[in-house]
Amino acid sequence: MPRRTVRSTVPKRLVRAAVAARRRAYAPYSKFAVGAAVLAADGTVFTGCNVENASYGLSVCAERVAILTAVAAGRRRLRAATTPCGACRQVMDEFGVETVILAPAGRTPAAVPLRELLPLPFAKRALRGRPRHAGL
Ligand SMILES: [Zn+2]
């Protein structure tokens, strides 16, 4: 996967915001605190932290918390986000994220197009024209 080092301040800004958000993580089960940040089209940065639940399946990733926070604040066009899991990549596609900032510990953040991480997203257009009870 080709990775590019971005010279703009966006990657560092998002990584810094994500690291700060990580302190608010609620991760009593995994003990794996995660912070995330997304950049809205208007330049606003929204953050999130992972929020776990005793019923593990109800836990929410930091990236989705950041995205949902942005949507709740009226921002539905997002541009960039910090490192997501597969499920969060799908949610990012819904809101137009173009660039994912990969920030391995101790290394320079790199910008990667979401299309490289999720080449064939399940998109809204797939729902058009489908019968209500499609089994296939
Ligand atoms: Zn995730």
Image (cartoon, rainbow, N blue to C red):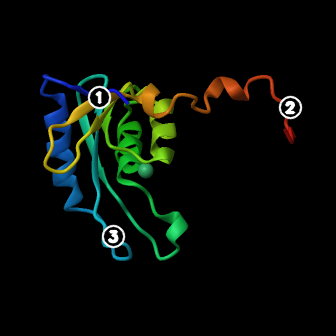
Residues at marks 3 and 1, CA–CA distance in whole angstroms: 30 Å
Residues at marks 2 and 1, CA–CA distance in whole angstroms: 41 Å
How far from the left and from the top, in percent, is residue 88? 45, 44
Q: Residue at x 39, y 28 (%)?
A: 97
Q: Kindly state the secondary structure of the residue where label 1 is placed.
A: loop
Q: Kindly state the secondary structure of the residue where label 3 is placed.
A: loop
Which residue type does callout 1 highlight?
Arg
* Figure quadrant of residue 114: top left
Residue 131: assigned label: 2
Label 3 sits on residue: 27
Which residue type does callout 3 highlight?
Ala
How far from the left and from the top, in percent, is residue 36? 29, 47
| Tag nearer the camera, 2 or 1 | 1
Label 1 sits on residue: 3
Give the mark, 2 or 1, whose residue is nearer the N terminus: 1
Crowding at mark 1 (Cα within 10 Å: few <14, some 14-19, many 20+): few
Residue placed most toward the observer, 88 or 109: 109
81 left or right of 115 in image:
left
